[in-house]
């Protein structure tokens, strides 16, 4: 499999796949990634909605590789100067956190002060985006950065495997390691490591494992024909994917408050029953529409056909970006999804 790191304009990027998908198999979607940062900061689904709709057609064998953070600085070169300054102000307020006047040399957990609600939200969104989600090492535990390292090295600290000296990465004296460990504070290896999180069911590591399992049950997100739906609410992103006889709908709210909306499904959505899913501790709403066979108690048929209305969704922003969210997605049991809110 060939994955290209090609941060190119929209009018040329698809050429890397080749006419029939015979060149690159996957491309990092820098357009979507940069729009995500702007949506997070603004509390608006508008930037990421526009980015998804602007993506050029690609061969059926090809995939967009979606990511929150990769191995370099978080590039913001596709944003306007004003948009870039918005993101800088929120996620890289100090010039020492920036690189090349266009990027952020921080890891995402540091940008959001380790806020689990916003981490869960961001990765819930990542795992539902059309294409293939890509994780950079350490994202599964919320590994932090080390701004004492030069330039891009800040986001490439040794992995925290345990709380032992050397973080389980090496038995060599820490002073001999080519890259400095993150030692102190909430991101230090004594308190943030794989060993500790493995035993904690509520940890980010265990949440990621559950999220990956859920994602694998819904191949529609990766292979399906997808479209962004109108919600009538600028804060909410709703998109649907259909493949192999099933449709999946994901809804994410970027605002700092619960929102209510109506989503009308496209005519080509698969007929059947809706089943509600929730990744524990997450802040997103996902639904899967199956063939009307082997219906479980959690599979419901929306009425009237093609209309979901209304639903209150949970929120993204917190601390200096807004007030803490109070919603939690509830599993529906034997209730029509049209008549009940999924989030209180």
Image: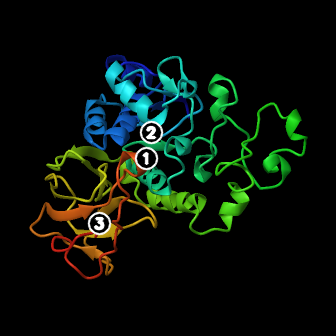
Image coordinates for residue 201, horizontal then vertical, percent:
59, 69
Count of labels in the image: 3
Task: Say if 69 sits above or below 248 in the image.
Answer: above
Q: Residues within 10 Å of mark 2 (few under 14, many from 20)?
A: many
Which residue is at 44% across, 64% downward?
A: 279
Q: Which residue is mark 3?
A: 290
Rounded to the nearest angstrom, the CA distance separating label 3 from label 1 is 23 Å
Element marked by disc 2: strand
Q: How is the image coloured?
A: rainbow
Task: Say if 193 sits above or below 234 in the image.
Answer: below
Which residue is at 31% across, 63% downward?
A: 288
Nearer to us of marks 3 and 1 is 1
| Closer to the camera in the image, 242 or 47 | 47
Q: Is residue 86 left or right of residue 280?
A: left
Using the rendered view, name the quadrant where residue 251 is placed.
Answer: bottom left
Tell me the quadrant of the picture where the C terminus can be found: bottom left
Tell me the quadrant of the picture where the N terminus can be found: top right
Using the rendered view, name the quadrant where residue 15 is placed.
Answer: top left
Q: Earlier in the sequence, mark 3 or mark 2?
A: 2
Q: Which mark is residue 66?
A: 2
Res 29 visible: no
Q: Which mark is residue 126?
A: 1
Q: Earlier in the sequence, mark 1 or mark 2?
A: 2
Res 237 visible: yes
Q: Is residue 184 left or right of residue 26?
A: right
Q: Residues within 10 Å of mark 3 (few under 14, many from 20)?
A: many
Q: Is residue 317 left or right of residue 183?
A: left
Q: Are marks 1 and 2 in contact (CB under 8 Å)?
A: yes
Element marked by disc 3: strand
Element marked by disc 1: helix
């Amino acid at each position: 499999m060939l994955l290209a790191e090609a941060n190119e304009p929209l009018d040329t990027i698809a050429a890397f796949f080749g006419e029939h998908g015979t060149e690159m198999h996957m491309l990092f979607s820098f357009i979507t990634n940069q729009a995500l940062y702007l949506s997070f900061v603004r509390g608006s689904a508008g930037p990421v909605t526009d980015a998804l709709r602007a993506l050029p057609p690609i061969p059926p064998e090809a995939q967009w590789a979606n990511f929150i953070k990769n191995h370099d600085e978080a590039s913001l070169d596709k944003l306007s100067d004003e948009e870039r300054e918005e993101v800088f102000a929120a996620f890289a307020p100090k010039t020492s956190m920036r690189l090349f006047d266009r990027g952020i040399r921080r890891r995402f957990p540091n940008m959001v002060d380790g806020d689990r609600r916003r981490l869960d939200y961001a990765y819930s969104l990542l795992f539902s985006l059309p294409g293939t989600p890509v994780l950079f090492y350490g994202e599964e535990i919320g590994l932090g950065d080390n701004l004492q390292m030069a330039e891009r090295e800040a986001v490439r600290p040794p992995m925290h495997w345990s709380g032992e000296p050397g973080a389980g990465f090496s038995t060599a004296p820490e002073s001999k390691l080519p890259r400095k460990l993150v030692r102190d504070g909430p991101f230090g290896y004594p308190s943030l490591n794989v060993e500790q999180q493995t035993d904690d069911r509520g940890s980010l590591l265990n949440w990621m494992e559950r999220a990956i399992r859920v994602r694998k049950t819904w191949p529609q997100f990766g292979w399906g024909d997808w479209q962004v739906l109108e919600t009538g609410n600028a804060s909410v992103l709703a998109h649907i994917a259909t493949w192999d006889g099933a449709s999946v709908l994901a809804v994410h709210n970027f605002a700092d408050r619960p929102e209510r909306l109506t989503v009308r499904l496209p005519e080509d959505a698969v007929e059947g029953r809706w089943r509600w899913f929730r990744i524990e501790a997450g802040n997103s709403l996902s639904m899967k529409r199956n063939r009307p066979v082997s219906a479980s108690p959690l599979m419901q048929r929306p009425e009237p056909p093609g209309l979901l209305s209304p639903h209150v969704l949970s929120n993204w922003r917190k601390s200096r970006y807004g007030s803490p969210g109070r919603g939690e997605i509830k599993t529906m049991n034997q209730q029509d999804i049209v008549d009940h809110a999924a989030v209180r």
